[in-house]
């Protein structure tokens, strides 16, 4: 199973995350399949940068976002876009 999850970078108390598609059995900071974007909780503006087409592609293939990534995708509007595209297919 493929998960869309955060991969931690940065130093102590200054985290920076990549949003990646990775196999569910791999460690958090281990091997990944594709980089989908970044998330920087230390910035107040433009915290999230996503490659929308890649994210939607992985969601269509069946990748499951973690709870934190699901919240990030909901705030960026991608989950709504994904749900709307699924309704159009039916």
Image: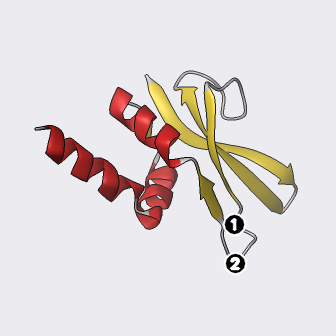
Query: Circle 2 — which element?
Result: loop
Q: Are marks 1 and 2 in contact (CB under 8 Å)?
A: no
Q: Among all residues in the image, which is located at the extreme left? A: 90
Image spot of residue 4 (x, y percent):
51, 38
Tell me where residue 64 sits by quadrant: top left
Neighbour tally class for label 1: few under 14, some 14-19, many 20 plus, Cα within 10 Å: some
Labelled disc at residue 44? 2
* Residue lying at 66% horizontally and 67% vertically, measured from the top left: 47
Q: Nearer the viewer, residue 78 or 9?
A: 78
Left/right of residue 50 with respect to residue 41 in the rendered view = left
**Does residue 82 lie above or below 71 as drawn?**
above
Q: Nearer the viewer, residue 86 or 9?
A: 86
C-alpha separation, residue under disc 1 versus residue under disc 2: 8 Å
* Residue lying at 45% horizontally and 60% vertically, measured from the top left: 71
Q: Among all residues in the image, which is located at the extreme right? A: 11
Left/right of residue 80 with respect to residue 66 in the rendered view = left
Q: Quadrant of the C terminus?
A: top left
Labelled disc at residue 41? 1
Q: Nearer the viewer, residue 50 or 11?
A: 50
Tell me where residue 22 sits by quadrant: top right
Q: Among all residues in the image, which is located at the extreme bottom? A: 44
Image spot of residue 38 (x, y percent):
67, 52
């Amino acid at each position: 199973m493929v998960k869309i999850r955060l991969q931690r970078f940065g130093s102590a108390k200054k985290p920076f995350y990549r949003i990646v598609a990775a196999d569910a059995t791999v460690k958090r900071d281990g091997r990944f399949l594709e980089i989908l974007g970044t998330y920087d909780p230390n910035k107040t503006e433009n915290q999230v940068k996503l490659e929308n087409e890649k994210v939607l592609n992985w969601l269509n293939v069946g990748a499951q976002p973690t709870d934190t990534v699901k919240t990030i995708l909901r705030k960026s509007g991608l989950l709504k876009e994904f749900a709307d595209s699924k309704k159009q297919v039916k």
